[in-house]
Image (tube, grey):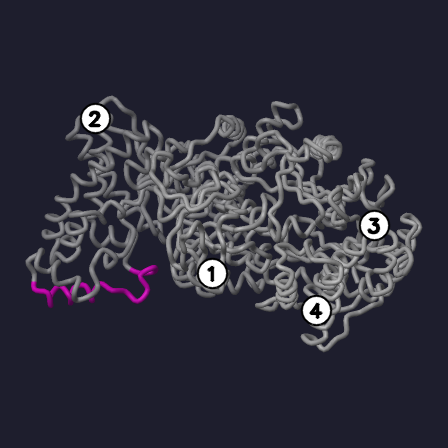
Amino acid sequence: MPSVERYVYFFGNGRADGSAAMRDILGGKGAGLAEMANLGLPVPPGFTISAKLCITYLEEGTFPAALRAEVDRHLKHLERVTKKGFGDARNPLLVSVRSGAAVSMPGMMETILNLGLNDQTVEGLIAGSKNPRFAYDSYRRFVQMYGDVVFDLGKLKENPFEEALARAKARRKAKRDIDLPTDDLKALVQEFKTIVLTETGRTFPDDPHQQLWDAIEAVFKSWNTRRAKDYRALHNIPDSLGTAVNIVTMVYGNMGDDCGTGVAFTRDCSTGERVLNGDLLTNAQGEDVVSGARTPEPIAKMKRGKLAKIYRELERLATKLEKHFKDVQDVEFTFEHGQLYMLQTRRAQRAGLAAVRIAVEMVQEGLITEDEAVQRIPPQDLDQLFHPMVDPRASVTVLAKGLPASPGAATGEVVFDADEAEALKKRGHDVILVRPETSPEDFHGIVAARAVLTARGGMTSHAAVVARGMGKTCVVGAKDIDVDPSAGRFRVNGRAIKRGQVITVDGTTGRVILGAAKLVSPKVGKEYGRLMEWADARRRLRVRANADIPADARRAREFGAEGIGLCRTEHMFFEGDRITLMREMIVASDEAGRRRALAKLLPIQRHDFEGIFEAMGGLPVTIRLLDPPLHEFLPHTREEIAPLAKRLKVPAAQLERIVHSLVEANPMLGHRGCRLGITYPEITEMQAQAIFEAACHVVGRGSKVAVEIMVPLVADVRELVNQTAIIRRVAQEVFHREGRAVPYLVGTMIELPRAALTADEIAKEAEFFSFGTNDLTQTTFGLSRDDAGRFLPFYVEHGLLSEDPFQCIDQAGVGKLIEMAVKLGRSTRRDLKVGICGEHGGEPSSVKFCHRTGMNYVSCSPFRLPIARLAAAQAALEEAGVVNRTRATV
């Protein structure tokens, strides 16, 4: 077992053994309970078993002997504090057993309520509460939750407990389980126990101590359920954290109409508005709110009537927690006959737009600093600000309206099953997952779907919290729709929507729209501009965009691009007649034929370059010369070749032979990049002429240009010497004809290991390096990005790789080559400009790596520019040692 000071930590009665700073040991839930107890908030007493034990238990399969003794000691202390006895038939102590990892994983692991009930202690609960119906409802819930979690019956495709409950409600024609009378609930307890025996061959345990230890074991095991592992993979949460186990004295929200439970957010986590909001259910236990089994009421309804006093107390405590933690809190609470209890506080998941508004307003309120605001926003959350929205001017058919749980809009085919959603996504379909309500078992379907729609549930239901955390569009509680997954349809207002039909889900307004609505880009608020001003003032790393046409360049400027780091010239050849001219050049039998075709392409490229230079207004533009192998421009089938042969006036058989002769066994490593310009120098000449003529024309019209020409796939400095000589010769010829010169740089893309290893030699010729991390990753790993997707997820899932190297830079391998190349290159040329232009340029951890490596800029797609700008600012703050002084938030 690991060496730890202790296994168990007590909290309650205004004190705790732990604090919010001990999240790694207590987990988020335990740390929150401890901190609230220390603050004097009304927390039910209990104790937390350290998360440090979880992984060791999962590896070894046993508990340390000392743990049992320590739990027994704390259980006795809990009995003294509550003046109740664990297993006492007259005055029973009942507890909840709840998971809690250091990083919030809502709904991913297990909880058991009312533990300690059996046929004797239920009588004591009846005597103490004077409410037999409540007692047997609690007993029924306990057996069901225990059966689902400990006996794994919750994993069955058709849940036998839910089926039995549905039959009982049908017999009474009851809409809800709270409408069932005591006798029915008592009968369900026995029926549920029979289900356990039938399905597992094991008797439901009556001994509360056995119940407790089986529950502790089940919570530890829930760390490795599929949904928990999927959630950690999606959110980059380490598998090594483990979960703590919290044993908490039960308080009851299901004792009657003056009791209830809910979840509150100290600010609106969809919009960022500074208002207490959330969900409430009276006469309910906590799982009723988050499961979506009942659609809750807005918490604002507590302001008036008999719950107004509780609301004021909740508002006071919520405000105290937000000021203490200096962050928006997600609070769970229960009130029992007018007494409010705080069950959990943690950092609230929020939509990207809300996160930005909250951070900026907290600076204005004096809660946090500008540095803390910049550090607080996960850079990838900014992507949510630019999700499409339904065009306000579009005419749409609204099927139903629910709660707008996570903003944005998405269109897709309706599916009713998580497995089907995942399968269709892999086949390239856009899908909308529609469920009565979601459960943790649906997590992989939520990941696959473009949006989620549920008939039941509130703003804190499972679907809402999970989707909001992912930035995925979600509408919940659309009560007018009747979802029938087994029939593959949902009905709404006399209309049936079947599996495969297209709908649009508008998570900003809560609308469910028939068909594919027109979507438009949203408008961001003034808070976004303020946050980015702060970020831009703090970052050293410049941020450029990958843009291939003038329209992309203009869009990049709107997103804050400080130049173009990659203009892929081959992308200019694929439209309309351009592809035919390119093909004419490729299939030409001699240099003269190639030059005739290139002469036709020259004015097209020149026109595109002029548009890009004008759009960038003097900011640097890095243009990569032709890179892909020539066969990528050609048709491949006989049916596609025939019309081209006719247009080019060559025999189809001859053209077919030419096409086949250009096909390469491994085009990624074949005749491409600078190798094309070396064997066909006329290609390099045409592209250089188009670039310099465009630059001269734009300067002649009174604008500035900054040209950087990038030679791709260089492995040896002699290749770069060859291409640079052509480029500089053409430049002088153009400048002489145009009567003016423009400044320019010639550099190379470092995308091969040999180039990285000989960077000092290459830097003698290159004035800048741009790392093409897509190909550098492929050639370093020996992986094809196009094919590795078939097995890379398996590698990540089984720990052979910590993450997909095509998503995040492999700092241990590829990163070392990059660091070496930067150091070697600058040893030769001290003022060497260095950047990155692969897909990694907009990924936060990769951007921070580029900052640490001393690069000048990163380049990424226009829509990822805000992410890169914020990540670069955070990297600068981290390097400067500016610590986020916000209190540890749980």
Residue at disc 2, secondary structure: loop
Name the amino acid type tagged 2.
Arg
The tag on residue 740 is 2
> Marks 1 and 3: CB-CB under 8 Å?
no
Name the amino acid type tagged 4.
Phe
Residue at horizontal 67 percent and vertical 60 percent from the top = 223
**Front label number (2 vs 1):** 1
CA separation, marks 2 and 1? Answer: 59 Å
Q: Earlier in the sequence, mark 3 or mark 4?
A: 3
Q: Earlier in the sequence, mark 2 or mark 3?
A: 3
Q: Is residue 217 visible?
A: yes
**Front label number (3 vs 4):** 4
Name the amino acid type tagged 1.
Glu
- In this view of the protein, which residue sits in the foreground, 588 or 883? 883
Residue that lies at the very extreme toward the left in this rendered image = 649
| Image position, residue 448 (x, y; %) | 47, 56
Residue at disc 1, secondary structure: helix
Name the amino acid type tagged 3.
Gly
Label 3 crowd bin: few (<14), some (14–19), many (20+), radius 10 Å? many
> Marks 2 and 4: CB-CB under 8 Å?
no
The tag on residue 46 is 3
Q: Earlier in the sequence, mark 2 or mark 1?
A: 1
**Front label number (2 vs 4):** 4
Q: Earlier in the sequence, mark 2 or mark 4?
A: 4
**Front label number (1 vs 4):** 4
| Image position, residue 620 (x, y; %) | 35, 33
- Tell me where the magenta segment starts and ends, as one range: 651-670
The tag on residue 422 is 1
Residue at horizontal 85 percent and vertical 67 percent from the top = 207
> Marks 3 and 4: CB-CB under 8 Å?
no
CA separation, marks 2 and 3? Answer: 81 Å
Left or right: 204 in relation to 476 = right
